[in-house]
């Protein structure tokens, strides 16, 4: 299997959102409930807090043969809850 890692694109938001919602179903992994995790928020993170622009947050996608396998979200603490 040939595996690559790349920065997420806006088109990846539905895949990332679905993964986050599944993870949030397990108590202790997210503060949010699955219903609160919207694809729109993922798009906002990818565009507004782009690591390339502000070095604040990043979604990484692991991909093989053009198919997304998993996603990782990392934040360096610059994002603050209102």
Image (cartoon, rainbow, N blue to C red):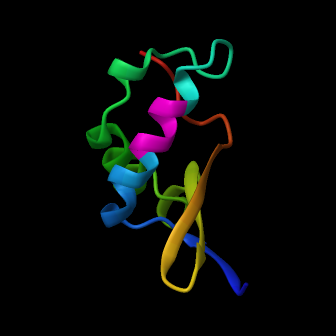
Q: Nearer the viewer, residue 44 or 56?
A: 44
Tally of numbered discs: 0
Residue 47 is one of the magenta-drawn residues: no
Tell me which residue sits at (39%, 67%) in the image: 9
Considering every residue shown, the one lying at the far front of the view is: 1
Task: Please give the range of residues in magenta.
Answer: 17-22
Considering every residue shown, the one lying at the far left of the view is: 40
The image shows residue 26, relative to residue 9, as above or below, that is: above
Q: Quadrant of the C terminus?
A: top left
Instruction: Report the side of 19 relative to 38 (left or right).
Output: right
Tell me which residue sits at (59%, 21%) in the image: 30
Q: Nearer the viewer, residue 46 or 34?
A: 34
Instruction: Report the side of 73 relative to 8 (left or right).
Output: right
Classified by dominant secondary structure, the portion drawn in magenta counts as helix
Residue 2 quadrant:
bottom right
Q: Quadrant of the N terminus?
A: bottom right
Instruction: Report the side of 66 relative to 13 (left or right).
Output: right
Tell me which residue sits at (40%, 42%) in the image: 17
From the top left corner, tell me how far across and down residue 56 is, in percent. Answer: 57, 48
Tell me which residue sits at (68%, 14%) in the image: 28
Q: Nearer the viewer, residue 68 or 81?
A: 68
From the top left corner, tell me how far across and down residue 69 is, in percent. Answer: 58, 64
From the top left corner, tell me how far across and down residue 39 is, in percent. Answer: 31, 42
From the top left corner, tell me how far across and down residue 44 is, in percent. Answer: 33, 46
Instruction: Report the side of 73 relative to 32 (left or right).
Output: right
The image shows residue 71, relative to residue 1, as above or below, that is: above
């Amino acid at each position: 299997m040939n595996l690559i890692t790349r920065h997420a694109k806006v088109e990846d938001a539905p895949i990332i959102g679905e993964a986050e919602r599944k993870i949030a179903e397990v108590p202790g992994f997210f503060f949010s409930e699955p219903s609160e995790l919207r694809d729109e928020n993922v798009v906002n993170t990818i565009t507004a807090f782009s690591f390339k622009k502000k070095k604040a947050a990043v979604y990484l996608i692991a991909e093989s043969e053009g198919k997304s396998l998993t996603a990782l979200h990392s934040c360096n603490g610059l994002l603050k809850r209102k």
